[in-house]
Image: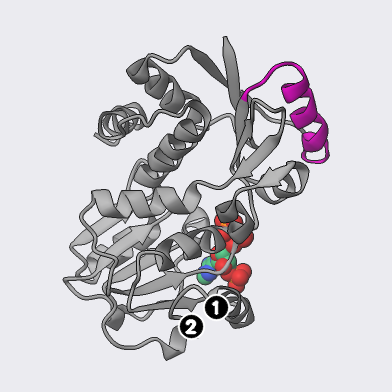
């Protein structure tokens, strides 16, 4: 049976095996999908061993995405832009192809929630790996403006400079932010510590869409905060998780699974519904 897995550390709580097993059932593909948690300095060896032993493809998550970028034979254009690899496929020619489906997953999830990206004014919070992966797919949707704000402003400036060939992207400090944004995407890891990015409450209005790439059994700190200040449409990163997985599954198997039912089952599994 074709073997796939996700590399991460820690990865024990990953939902990827659950999601891909449902995709395989739904599309009648025969495959198994497991977990691998190599020590941080043993990822390269573990990856080699997996493919030497007949593995067909894998996902890569924190903290190995940047390292995976350096270990594959060939990079997709979107992985090159993201500077990170979350999906690897062994091609029929024996080439390890590195791809990145995170940004596509975000955009697919935003669209599935009915969020309009074309001509919209987008605020992206954070300038780490998650922000980098999201920029090209967001700019491809032709927003009127995309502003990056980050605690360490120089990182936002560097990111804007790197992507400004793709669209109207600029960097502003949190203090400089003003005017009406249609969509705020939180790509910071602040929620992990139960912290909030230092965003002025005045930027939140009833028609704004709020997206937190993090998720949990209950609202993230950022989503709770945004609701408290009047946001009516809030979304967490669970949908992005399922959509990036669907994109990876499509890369591997050449068949696109449906995501709606799988997302519902995942929510049930997590006790969200
Ligand atoms: P990831 O790969 O998940 O993006 P990362 O590269 O470590 O992780 O980036 C984390 C991002 O969250 C950074 O933009 C970080 O801001 P700094 O560049 O200033 O470190 C941001 N971040 C983390 N904790 C934060 C907090 N409490 N408030 C605001 N931003 C925070």
The answer to whether residue 267 is left or right of residue 57 is: left
Q: Residue 262 carries which label?
A: none
Position of residue 30 relative to residue 134, above or below, is: above
Whole-number angstrom distance, CA of label 1 to CA of label 2 = 5 Å
Q: Mark 1 points at which residue?
A: 160
Given residues 56 and 20, the one toward you in this image is 56
Residue at 48% over, 83% down: 170
- Front one among 121 and 126: 121
Position of residue 10 measured from the top left corner of the image (x, y, whole percent): 64, 36
Q: Is mark 2 on a helix, strand or loop?
A: strand
* Tag 1–tag 2 contact (CB < 8 Å): yes
- The circle drawn on residue 170 is 2
* Residue 60 locus on image (x, y percent): 62, 39
Q: Horizontal placement of 120 versus 157: left or right?
A: left
Quadrant assignment, res 21 = top left
Q: Look at the image and give the residue range highlighted in magenta.
A: 40-56
Q: At x 41% / y 35%, what residue is drawn? A: 246
């Amino acid at each position: 049976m074709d073997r796939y897995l996700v590399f991460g550390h820690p990865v024990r709580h990953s939902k990827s095996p659950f999601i891909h097993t449902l995709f395989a059932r739904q599309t009648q593909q025969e495959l198994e999908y497991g977990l691998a948690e190599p020590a941080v300095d043993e990822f390269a060896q573990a990856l080699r061993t997996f493919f030497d032993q007949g593995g067909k493809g894998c996902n890569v998550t924190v903290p190995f995405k940047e390292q995976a970028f350096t270990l594959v034979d060939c990079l997709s254009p979107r992985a090159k832009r993201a500077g990170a690899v979350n999906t690897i496929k062994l091609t029929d020619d024996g080439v390890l192809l590195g791809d990145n489906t995170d940004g596509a997953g975000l955009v697919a999830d935003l669209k599935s929630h009915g969020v309009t990206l074309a001509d919209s004014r987008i605020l992206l919070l954070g300038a780490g790996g998650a922000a980098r992966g999201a920029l090209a797919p967001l700019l491809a949707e032709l927003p009127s403006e995309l502003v990056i704000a980050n605690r360490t402003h120089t990182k936002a400036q560097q990111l804007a400079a790197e992507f400004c060939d793709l669209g109207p992207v600029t960097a502003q400090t949190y203090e400089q932010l003003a005017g009406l944004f249609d969509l705020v995407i939180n790509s910071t890891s602040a929620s992990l510590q139960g912290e909030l990015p230092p965003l002025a409450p005045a930027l939140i209005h009833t028609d704004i869409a709020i997206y937190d790439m993090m998720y949990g059994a209950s609202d993230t700190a950022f989503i709770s905060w945004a609701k408290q200040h009047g946001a009516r449409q809030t979304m967490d990163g669970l949908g992005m998780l399922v959509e990036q997985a669907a994109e990876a599954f499509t890369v591997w198997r050449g068949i696109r699974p449906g995501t709606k039912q799988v997302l519902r089952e995942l929510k049930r599994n997590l006790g969200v519904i």
